[in-house]
Amino acid sequence: MPTVDLNADLGEGFEFDAELMCIVSSCNIACGGHAGDEASMAATVRLAIDSDVAIGAHPSYPDRAGFGREAGSITGAELKQSLIEQLVTLRDIAGLAGAEIRHVKPHGALYNDAARSRECADIVVDALLNATSGAALVGPPASELLQAATANRVTYIAEAFVDRAYRPDGRLVPRSEPNAVHADINTITTQALMLAIDGKVTAEDGEVVEVAADTLCIHGDTPNASQVARAVRDVLESNGVTVDVAY
């Protein structure tokens, strides 16, 4: 049976971090761009170490007011410098605790922009190479991020979302559209199992589409986040899926 990583975005100021850290196998820690500060980074790193969870960085556009959801707020050298600063801050905090950044996952608008734009993807990969030591890159399958990582020999971890709706082309339904985020736990666990075992998802129009993924994301900013995460892990493991880091 397959092995799949289960990740969550943490250190963003929501209340379920400690509970989620006991369930996931990897975490993506906000490092100051859209949320988080040195104190929250240190606390989340310690939680991850205590829970034996792989530590990842979750950098974004410097957009705290908009929670990193404003596309293209900065570009080019300015964006690269911001990402390097975010990654170095988390890297140094993790290093003081005896840990290291295992992966980098862009947040929000940066994730979407870098998935579509090779120029943006190259900036993300360049920052990763400058600020980490052999970290993997997490992003959507068949994206510009994948192409940039491959060109630079960076390990790529393809990600899918257990609680987001998909379009027939394999892309996420934008959050601005109705029913973009699943609320029903049975729908979420069914999607997680289908992704983990078959590498497929049922799109919003009912079509079954390929979405190959090494890691599955659970959002930590929903009211029942820990309940959803526990249900997903229980369903995966009860069906023979091993939950562990994929790199």
Image (cartoon, rainbow, N blue to C red):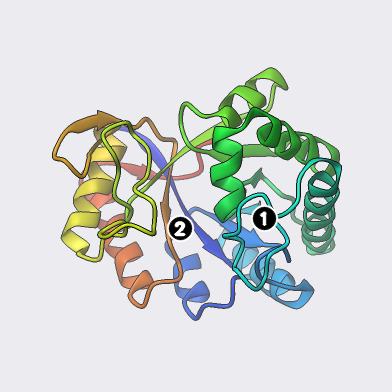
Return the residue found at the far bottom: 15
Residue 34, quarter of picture: bottom right
Q: Disc 1 on helix, strand or loop?
A: loop
Measured as percent of width and height from the top left, residue 81 is found at: 86, 49
68 or 21, which lies in front? Answer: 68
Q: Is residue 65 left or right of residue 214?
A: right
For the point 49% across and 81% down, which residue is it? 15
For the question of whether residue 133 can be seen, the reply is no
Q: Which mark is residue 60?
A: 1
Measured as percent of width and height from the top left, residue 38 is found at: 78, 72
Above-or-below relation of 169 to 50? above
How many numbered discs sit on the rendered protein? Answer: 2
Q: For label 2, count other residues whose C-alpha is less than 10 Å away and answer few (under 14), some (14-19) or many (20+).
A: many
Residue kind at label 2, given as amino acid type: Val
Return the residue found at the far left: 206
Residue 218, quarter of picture: bottom left
Above-or-below relation of 174 to 120? below
Give the quadrant of the C terminus.
Answer: top right
Measured as percent of width and height from the top left, residue 216 is found at: 41, 47
Measured as percent of width and height from the top left, residue 12 is found at: 59, 71
For the point 72% across and 34% down, which residue is it? 125
Tag 1 or tag 2, which sits nearer the N-term?
Answer: 2
Residue marked by disc 2: 24
